[in-house]
Amino acid sequence: PLDVTFTNNSQNTSSYVWDFGNGTVITVNNNGSQSQTYTQSTTAMLVAFANPTCSDTAYVNISIIICGCMDPNALNYNPDAVSEDGSCIYPVPVVIAPNIFTPNGDGDNDFFFFDTEYTIILEYTILNRWGNTMFDQTIDLSAGNTQLGWDGTSSSGAEAEEGTYFYKYFATGIDGTQISGHGFLQLARD
């Protein structure tokens, strides 16, 4: 809502009719200030009377501009806003990793990949128990790329042994916020 204070600078007048354009109309006998609250655009009018047959009228347009977050990626996006007010609140990236996968070629759970929300870039590395890199990938999810994930092979293309592997990731959110994490996963072929 917009609070407006009207100042009456009329001279040589004795009575006044205010039509505030919001359904409120008042008649007063002094030129004191008047205050009103608006939620939509309108036109206010003041009629100043010197006597019953002599008057003058002034108008003022009240423009209500809806301010708010105009970015549809933000949590508090306001589709009615016509002016950005810098209030956008963006979600923190979310990365969820499974703890087991079975790359045995049966078409079910053959790839290890992360589920993400509010993430535009995901970088991750899979390491074996000796700290050797088995797989790494950087994905620009904002470009519509999908992640294929790790298929359970080493960088040379050989099948990785069953067992425990470790991952670390960095995720970049919609507004550039970065998070990181790490954990372990189990590779089982049966």
Image: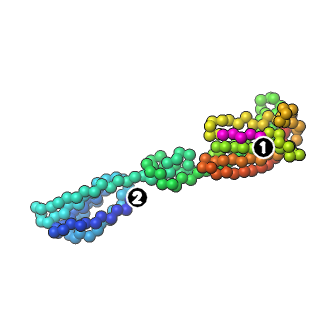
Query: Quadrant of the image for the C terminus?
Result: top right
Query: Quadrant of the image for the N terminus?
Result: bottom left
Name the amino acid, label 2: Pro
Quadrant of the image occupied by residue 39: bottom left
Would you place residue 85 above or below residue 111 in this image?
below
Q: Residue 172 in magenta?
A: no
Q: Residue at x 64, y 51 (%)?
A: 177
Does 107 sit left or right of 164 as displayed? left
User: Residue tagged by mark 2?
Assistant: 1
* Residue 112 point in image, percent of width and height: 77, 38
Q: Residue 139 in magenta?
A: yes
User: Residue tagged by mark 1?
Assistant: 125
Q: Residue at x 52, y 55 (%)?
A: 87
Label annotation for residue 23 = none
From which residue to which does the magenta span run? 136-140
| Majority SS type along the magenta span | strand
Q: Residue at x 22, y 58 (%)?
A: 58
Q: Secondary structure at mark 1?
A: strand
Q: How is the image coloured?
A: rainbow
Q: Residue at x 38, y 59 (%)?
A: 2
In space, the residues marked 1 and 2 are separated at their CA atoms by 51 Å
Q: Is residue 89 visible?
A: yes
Going from N to C along the chain, the mark reached first, 1 or 2, is 2
Quadrant of the image occupied by residue 23: bottom left
